[in-house]
Image (cartoon, rainbow, N blue to C red):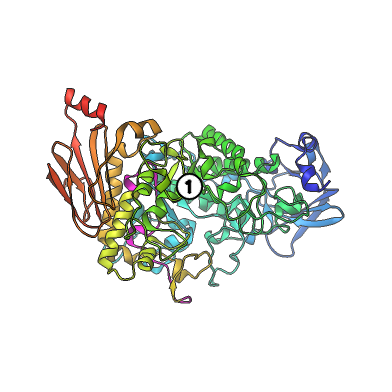
């Protein structure tokens, strides 16, 4: 029987499942090293005084213990001691870093024993998680950024360019006084910052900080330790831990929660990963001939459905949430993971704090090693109700197919996208009256509630919306494309669900790459010149920034845009008839009545208003919480724009009738 099949037997799982703590378990009096390696014939603990170099202290044989674990205990305070394991399986020996290592040396080549309590910044545990609205997922406004991008451009004027500590700085401004850095986040009004992978990844050489090198970080090496290139001293494993915590503490003090982008679906290496060299073929899905399944399109995929792999992922997420006080997790290619694992992750995180947000990509990069019905695909979202998924339905409905660069969407001039937009507006929930045959990607509602739906039009992957518009609409001038951009953002922020934008989207981020002579749609290892955020664009496109800022403020002010159940959406949202194509209009009934109209036509359009007096807060030029004008009877919606108006409900029978009949 192939080894992979043995791992899936009840006999193996009953004999070797270990439910205790693993890793270097530190106390000032002793450190117990415990590693799970059930197929090993021997395991040796190697100790070092430093994280790199010829400074070995000793090698000692570990003892077999319960459920496939190996242990060795060292007396005394071993904080700061570096170590590796030599694991021998079938007469082949591999030197590995402990998969459970909580700290590592430079380039993640050795684990480090660490006193985690000693790494806490002063007051870290006393700094509460910031509140955001009622702390429901739909109250969140997520802002995705890369640690290096955030502060690496000279315009950031940071003392710590490209480092965790840049998030601890305030008072940074452009010469004209425009706020940058953390002050920008506060000014914009986002509630959560989502960091691209910030665990220890492979491709950046931490010992050569002056070498031009960049990576997004989707190449995991050590899952439970922070990335060293973002620290001021990658050689000391405790420094990166402390500085990561300083970053989280500073963001919390500024009212911003922190989400971590995690990549448990694959490892940087397949056979050469630390997980695989510890227990060959266990942590990855393999075929009967021993080759690796590749649902990640990165040469391998992890086997989250196996009990000890599931335990590893859950333990790792819980470690980050409890030790670093993180507030959310974004799962890369979540569709590779099994549903049971995602539900267990959600349940364990809710024990730590019920307001922690979990969501991910409900798709894969290729064929997976387990059936579709077992996986956390978007179409199975109702089976993991505590976890959200990105909506490619609204993304491509707004701007056109993400991979067909010339293809247009609703805002950029394509026709017959109204049902796509409507489906996005209701958060991809069950809603009567939407013609699902005209929806591009889904033939049925997939979200159990709007709290599961992450609405976006731009992320680190693929072209920015600004570059997409330049590619799909090269004949249009900048002024016209700015209208399209504003309308795209307006749809995201007025749709039911969780709004998500990429860092710099609010001032028309572009990724022009001179080396390829065009826009970079996959800048994962492109130069800083492509990936850095040029803060000067915020001053250049201040009008666009103010529009995004106003959209966020209006959304926060009106809970009708932030429903949490399918029933609330179905009962209180009503689509209105539009006499013209390429328009979508609807009303929301709540403490106030809200009217939203999207006009993707190039011409101004007149719209007959529901009865009463309406106050306009958002049009094609401005957005916010100030009244722009008052209208009744009918209104004009400018070409390629939106209009949002509010009618205050009167008390008494009239209000009750409107709620009963949804206008």
* Residue 596 visible (yes or no): yes
Q: Around disc 1, counting alpha carbons within 10 Å, would you say few (fewer than 14), some (14 to 19), or many (20 or more)? A: many
Quadrant location, the C terminus: top left
> On the rendered structure, is 567 left or right of 295?
left
Q: Outermost residue toward the top?
A: 653
| Residue 100 higher or lower than 404, as above or below | above
Q: Residue at x 82, y 46 (%)?
A: 39
User: Who's the residue at 50% across and 65% down the image?
Assistant: 522
Is 61 covered by the magenta stretch? no
Q: Secondary structure at mark 1?
A: strand
Task: Tell me where the magenta segment starts and ends, as one range.
Answer: 493-516
Residue 45 rendering spot, x and y as whole percentages: 78, 51
Q: What residue is rendered at 77% in x and 43% in y? A: 7
Q: Position of residue 243 (x, y in %)?
A: 51, 53
Would you name the residue on which mark 1 appears?
A: 259
- 124 vs 531, nearest the viewer: 531
Frontmost residue, 285 versus 430 = 430
Does 203 sit left or right of 627 as displayed?
right
């Amino acid at each position: 029987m192939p080894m992979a099949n043995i791992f899936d037997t009840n006999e193996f799982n009953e004999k070797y499942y270990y439910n205790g703590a693993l890793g270097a378990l530190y106390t000032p009096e002793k450190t117990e090293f415990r590693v799970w390696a059930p197929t090993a014939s021997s395991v040796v603990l190697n100790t070092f005084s430093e994280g790199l170099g010829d400074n070995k202290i000793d090698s000692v044989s570990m003892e077999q213990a319960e459920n496939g674990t190996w242990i060795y205990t060292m007396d005394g305070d071993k904080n700061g001691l570096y170590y590796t394991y030599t694991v021998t399986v079938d007469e082949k020996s591999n030197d590995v870093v402990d998969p459970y290592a909580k700290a590592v040396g430079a380039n993640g080549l050795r684990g480090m024993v660490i006193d985690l309590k000693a790494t806490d910044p002063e007051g870290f545990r006393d700094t509460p998680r910031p509140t955001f609205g009622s702390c429901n997922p739909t109250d969140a406004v997520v802002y995705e950024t890369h640690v290096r991008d955030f502060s690496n451009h000279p315009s950031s004027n940071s003392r710590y360019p490209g480092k965790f500590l840049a998030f601890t700085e305030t008072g940074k401004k452009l010469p004209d006084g425009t706020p940058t850095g953390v002050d920008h986040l506060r000014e914009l009004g986002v509630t959560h910052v989502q960091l691209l992978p910030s665990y220890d990844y492979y491709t950046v050489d931490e010992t050569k900080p002056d070498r031009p090198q960049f990576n997004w970080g989707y190449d995991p090496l050590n899952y439970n330790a922070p990335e060293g290139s973002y620290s001021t001293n990658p050689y000391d494993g405790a420094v990166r831990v402390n500085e990561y915590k300083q970053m989280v503490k500073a963001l919390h003090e500024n009212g911003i929660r922190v989400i971590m982008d995690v990549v448990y679906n694959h490892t940087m290496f397949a056979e050469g990963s630390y997980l695989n060299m510890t227990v060959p073929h266990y942590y990855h899905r393999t075929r009967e001939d021993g080759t690796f399944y590749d649902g990640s399109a990165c040469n391998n995929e992890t086997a989250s459905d196996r009990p000890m792999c599931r335990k590893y992922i859950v333990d790792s997420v819980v470690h980050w949430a409890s030790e670093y006080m993180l507030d959310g997790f974004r799962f890369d290619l979540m569709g590779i993971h099994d549903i049971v694992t995602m539900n267990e992750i959600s349940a364990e995180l809710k024990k730590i704090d019920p307001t922690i947000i979990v969501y991910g990509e409900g798709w894969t990069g290729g064929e997976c090693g387990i059936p579709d019905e077992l996986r956390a695909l978007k179409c199975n979202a109702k089976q993991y109700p505590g976890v959200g998924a990105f909506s490619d339905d609204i993304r491509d409905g707004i701007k056109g197919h993400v991979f067909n660069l010339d293809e247009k969407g609703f805002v950029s001039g394509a026709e017959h996208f109204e049902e796509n937009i409507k489906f996005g507006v209701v958060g991809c929930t069950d809603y009567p009256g939407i013609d699902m045959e005209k929806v591009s990607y889904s033939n049925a509602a997939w979200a159990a509630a709007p709290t599961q739906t992450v609405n976006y039009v731009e992320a680190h992957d693929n072209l920015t919306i600004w570059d997409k518009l330049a590619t799909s609409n090269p004949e249009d001038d900048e002024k016209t494309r700015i209208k399209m951009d504003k309308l795209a953002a307006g749809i995201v922020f007025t749709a039911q669900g969780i709004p998500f934008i990429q860092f710099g989207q609010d001032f028309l981020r572009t990724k022009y790459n001179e080396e390829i002579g065009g826009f970079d749609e996959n800048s994962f290892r492109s130069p800083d010149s492509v990936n850095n955020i040029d803060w000067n664009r915020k001053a250049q496109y201040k009008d666009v920034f103010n529009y995004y800022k106003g959209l966020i403020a209006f959304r926060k002010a009106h809970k009708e845009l932030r429903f949490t159940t399918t029933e609330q959406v179905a009962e209180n949202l009503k689509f209105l008839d539009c006499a013209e194509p390429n328009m979508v209009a609807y009303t929301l009934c709540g403490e106030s009545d809200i009217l939203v109209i999207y006009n993707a036509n190039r011409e101004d359009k007149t719209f007959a208003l529901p009865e009463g007096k309406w106050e306009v807060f958002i049009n094609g030029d401005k957005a916010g919480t100030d009244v722009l004008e008052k209208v009744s009877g009918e209104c004009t919606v400018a070409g390629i724009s939106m209009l949002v108006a509010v009618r205050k409900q009167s008390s008494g029978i009239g209000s009750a009738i409107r709620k009963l009949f949804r206008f």
